[in-house]
Image (spheres, grey):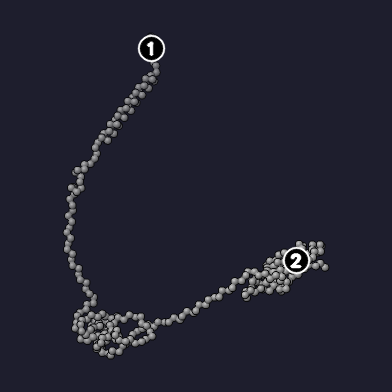
Amino acid sequence: MLDQLVESSSHRKETARRGGFMLSTLVVVCSVFLSGILWSLFAKDLKMGEDDLEISTLVAPVPMPEDAPRQPEPVAKMEKQEQSQKVVETTRQANIMRIDESPNVSAEISTVPNTQKARPNGNFKISEGLELEAQGLNSATRGGENNVGGVGVGLAESSQPMPVEKLKIKETPPPPPLTKEIPKPPVNAKKSLGVINGKATNLVKPTYSPAALAVRAAGEVNVQVTIDEKGNVISANAVSGHVLLRPSAETAARASKFNPTLLSLQPVKVTGLIVYKFAPK
């Protein structure tokens, strides 16, 4: 009984080998199929024919209509028609002098343009209508705003010139003469006066400092000062003298007052020297 038992074993290797074979076969078949499709697309000639699509042979030209003869333009009607008429007497709108006549001398100058004709040599009459010539056709123009057509009725006048409206021109006064300013002579910024003790209006006396009294300092102290245009001391600097006496001498010099110094009638800055003499009591 034991001789007829069937022993089962694993078939994984055979299954894997069979699956790989089928997959390879499928890939090869798909590749061949796609290659055939692509080759058929590129091998197909998709060009359009060039012989049968010539535009000039397929499309006939459109016949152009012939230009119609231009119709004559209507003649514009003149608003003011001048009819030829026989004129018996010359007419003028105003009594204007002729060019060959000597004009009247007048101080006024007219700037208004004249729109009327000059008076003729013979007889004429004043009319508000057209200016007509006795021999010839009506070739004049209308003048004025309230003119009436036709020949107006008027009286014959003498050939004396009529006054023409003139425009007065105002004379402008001449401009005043220009006055040229005389430049002032240049002045020096500073002028040295030397010792100026006698020119002071208020010469302040210096005081003895306790240190100077202790050592009994004495002697002269020269202070260099600068005085402005108003006579005030704007700077003071001791140039010689005892060291303990210089500060009090500079303080007294700054508080002093002087008369302004004039140069060409102009106040100027000056420099000078103030001499202080110290003597202990």
Pointer 2 residue: 221
Asked if residue 137 shows in the view, the reply is yes
Alpha carbon of mark 1 to alpha carbon of mark 2: how far? Answer: 151 Å
Q: Nearer the viewer, residue 95 or 180?
A: 180
Where residue 226 sits in the image (x, y, percent)?
68, 68
Left or right side of 95 for 186: right
Checking the image for residue 241, the label placed there is none
When asked about the image quadrant of residue 90, the answer is: bottom left
**Which residue type does callout 2 highlight?**
Val
Q: Nearer the viewer, residue 230 or 165?
A: 230
Checking the image for residue 5, the label placed there is 1
Quadrant of the snapshot with the C terminus: bottom right
Left or right side of 211 for 21: left
Quadrant of the snapshot with the N terminus: top left
Q: Nearer the viewer, residue 133 or 258?
A: 258
* Element assignment for label 2: strand
Question: Looking at the picture, does residue 240 appear above or below residue 117?
Answer: above
When asked about the image quadrant of residue 273, the answer is: bottom right
What residue is rendered at 49% in x and 79% in y?
176
Left or right side of 108 for 194: right
